Image (cartoon, rainbow, N blue to C red):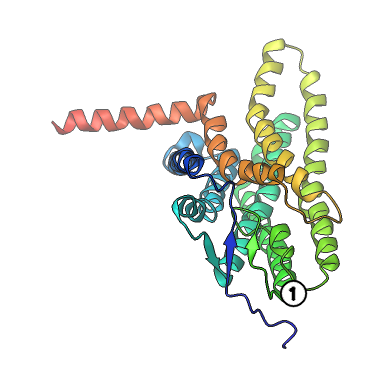
Amino acid sequence: MGQHQHVIEEFVLLGLTSQRNILIVLFVVFLSCYIISLTGNIVIITLSRISSRLHTPMYFFLSNLSFLDIWFTSSIAPKMLINFLSVRKSISFNGCVAQMFISLSLGGTECYLLLSMAYDRYVAICAPLHYTNIMHPVLCIKMAICSWIGGIVNSLIHTVFAMQLPYCGPNVINHFFCEVPSVLELACADTSLNKTVIFFFAIVVVMGPFFLILITYGFIISSILKISTSSGRKKAFSTCASHVTVVSLFYGTIIFIYMRPGSTHVTNQDKMATLFYTVVTPVFNPLIYTLRNKDVIGAFRDITRKKFVSHELGK
């Protein structure tokens, strides 16, 4: 009991920098990012629910992704923003555990959701005549539930393993939030088992879905190249472009951080990469899926037109 007793009651987060002027600029920038992220993702969820043209498997998964992004960035950004302006940048031990568990759960879930979205695109392009039968609402719900369960189980394992270690000081985390590798640096015990667990589950949760997505897109590209008309090929590619962009942004940074065995040392490059996939990517996702998406723009116009007509009739 004594060996695993946690003497530390709170952690101090070093954050991105200690320079006051830069901290104020960062606060403004990332507060803007957070507001844009919340607004964009809420708009996507709302449109997907109320617009009949968006009642498709693709937008069901996209709504899940937007819901996930809202909570993913909310588990990190508010505390980070407060610490930008605080003299003492601390987080309680239990708060650190909660942040670690939530962010890991949502990050793992996103890996599986992006795989589900890739499968949806595969069926749409490689088996279009059977799309409605295959991508049945029941299957979509099951895939979403499995994604969330997979993310939660992965996070639970990492969090439990990390919290089994004793933390007796120092209590300064070289990061802007409680990410597992940075917290493990403060453990007063051997963390080699934890490093092995991190690497193993990174293969299962990160690289597994990533390779399946690559294989899926291999089949998709093969099918697209068989389309006889250039306009048909262009249309097929455009339906995948948004998903490919999101996958590249998300997996690129995740692989950079977690697929390095035997090291938990957190560098400034690691912080910037983590910042990208935790705060910046949730801003890009709704923009990527809406700006060049005719269905979403059309749904927005339909709703706006209905509001305008009802307003005119009410006069």
Name the residue: 81% across, 48% down. 259
- Looking at the rendered structure, the kind of residue marked 1 is Leu
- Residue toward you, 28 or 125: 28
- Residue toward you, 33 or 209: 33
Residue 241 seen in render:
yes
Q: Quadrant of residue 116?
A: top right
Instruction: Answer with left or right where residue 38 lies relative to residue 184.
Output: left
Q: Is residue 222 above or below residue 110?
A: above
Name the residue: 55% across, 40% down. 59
Q: Is residue 23 above or below residue 7?
A: above
Where is residue 297? Give x, y as percent: 46, 27
Q: Quadrant of the C terminus?
A: top left
Where is residue 196? Give x, y as percent: 85, 62
Instruction: Answer with left or right where residue 79 lies relative to residue 116.
Output: left
Q: Secondary structure at mark 1?
A: loop
Residue 115 seen in render:
no
The residue positioned farthest toward the bottom in the image shown: 1
Q: Is residue 131 above or below residue 196?
A: above
Instruction: Answer with left or right where residue 211 lies relative to residue 247.
Output: right
- Residue toward you, 198 or 119: 198
The residue positioned farthest toward the top in the image shown: 230
Q: How many marks?
A: 1
Where is residue 246? Give x, y as percent: 65, 35
Name the residue: 64% across, 67% down. 171
Q: Which residue is mark 1?
A: 165
Where is residue 148? Give x, y as percent: 64, 57
Q: Quadrant of the N terminus?
A: bottom right
Instruction: Answer with left or right where residue 7 lies relative to residue 87.
Output: right
- Residue toward you, 214 or 216: 214
